[in-house]
Image: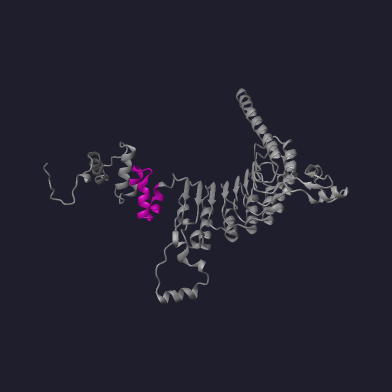
Amino acid sequence: MRRIIAEDLDWSLATVSSLSNLCLQCIVNNFEEKPIYEELTSSEKDFIQNRVSLSLPLHFAANVFPDGVYWKRRCITEPKTVLDMVTLCKDHIKKLNIAQLLPPVKEPQTEDEEQATELTLENEDDKSGMDHFDFRILLDKLTNLEELHLVYKVKSCGMNFEWSMFEMTNRDCESLAKALKSCKTLKLFRLHLSHLEDKKCRLLVKYLLDHPSLRTLDFSHNVIGDSGARAIGKLLTKSKLEILNLYDNNIGGPGAKAIAHALSKNTTLVSLNLCLNRLNDEGGQAICKALLNNKTLLHLQLGANGVTWLTALSLSSVLAQNNTLKSINLSCNTLGECCILHLEARATKKVNPLCHLGGYCHRGLVKTTSGSSMRPSFHVGGNALEEAMSHNTSVTECNIHLTDIEERKVSVINQMVWNNQFRKQETSPREKNTENAN
């Protein structure tokens, strides 16, 4: 067998490219003079985008590559490209999703500069070097933006973790608030996982009070407390919000009362999510009582808020009268506790005037094996909800998992919910046929 030893010692048969790849590489090398792209297959297009020069003029590249890895490469290597592109695509961007914001790298300072900085700056949060991106530069130019999803965090930071990577500074908040106010077309704003506390929340709300088009506000997974909730309550009275998501914050009873007060007068909100807060019965009852006057809310979520049978009773009175609500979430609360006042009244055979549960609590008591005393059977919240659902025809979703309600009661309530679903499915075709006939 004969062997051919190449003059190029680095050459081997494995490195020989296929003819198709050689042709594609030729297209890459001459792409600006003769762009061939639309005629290619999807895999060939990926080959071109992964290798074509990043120095192509923006007006040229924007018309050739509508989307793809080319723009990712260009933004990573040339961050300023994003701002340069805005003038070319400002009329076409309707949704902006920013999954992380890297804190700027501080340039090393001399000893004199460090001493001057220590003398002039008292608060580390106010150092200009720690601010993130000023969104006024961008949002002022996006004239058709409708959705903004934003999070102040760093992905995969590893051993370089610092809390400052997961929160915005005061100047960040102020510049963002002013940018939101100038973006008149914005319909959805989501700021989550950004350690948004009361002070910053109030500042953002201040600039959103008179926003003409905002319909969805999502401040989930932050640290908003009662002060921030009061500001949000004010926003509900002055805006046209339809969806409000405050999932996983630190809102307590006073904050929930402020939201409830606004909810009782609101005519636009259809969905309210307050799961994983600290409402307790003070806040839970206030929200439920507000629904006696509110006729527009369709979805209410109060899961994991430490509410008890008192809130269940307030909600039951709402369900008996309100035929607007469609879905309710009360999961991970303790709704089955029995009224100790009624327990004592039954034991002494005297009516306690402070006990206001009546039949609900009576059905929540059973005799012990000896028959001489009574013990709670954890049915109070379940009994109240069961009786209320028997009069309700609108609720088609009801989540009461992990609420200490007896399984039999849960099954009965679920059956009523399914009946409402079936009734709605039967009614919808009839309504459509009636509309078509007219």
The magenta region covers 61-88
Number of marks in picture: 0
Q: Nearer the viewer, residue 261 or 23?
A: 23
Which residue reaches farthest top? 437
Give me the residue at 67% from left, 32% from top: 419
Asked whether residue 424 is in view, the answer is yes
- Give the percent coordinates (x, y) of residue 46: 33, 43
Q: Does the magenta stretch include residue 85?
A: yes
Give me the residue at 43% from left, 47% from top: 90
- Give the percent coordinates (x, y) of residue 380: 75, 45
For the N terminus, the quadrant is top left
Q: Which of 394 and 74 is in front in this view?
A: 394
- Give the percent coordinates (x, y) of residue 160: 44, 62
- Give the percent coordinates (x, y) of residue 20: 24, 39
Residue 279, above or below 400: below
Query: What secondary structure prevails in the magenta region?
Result: helix
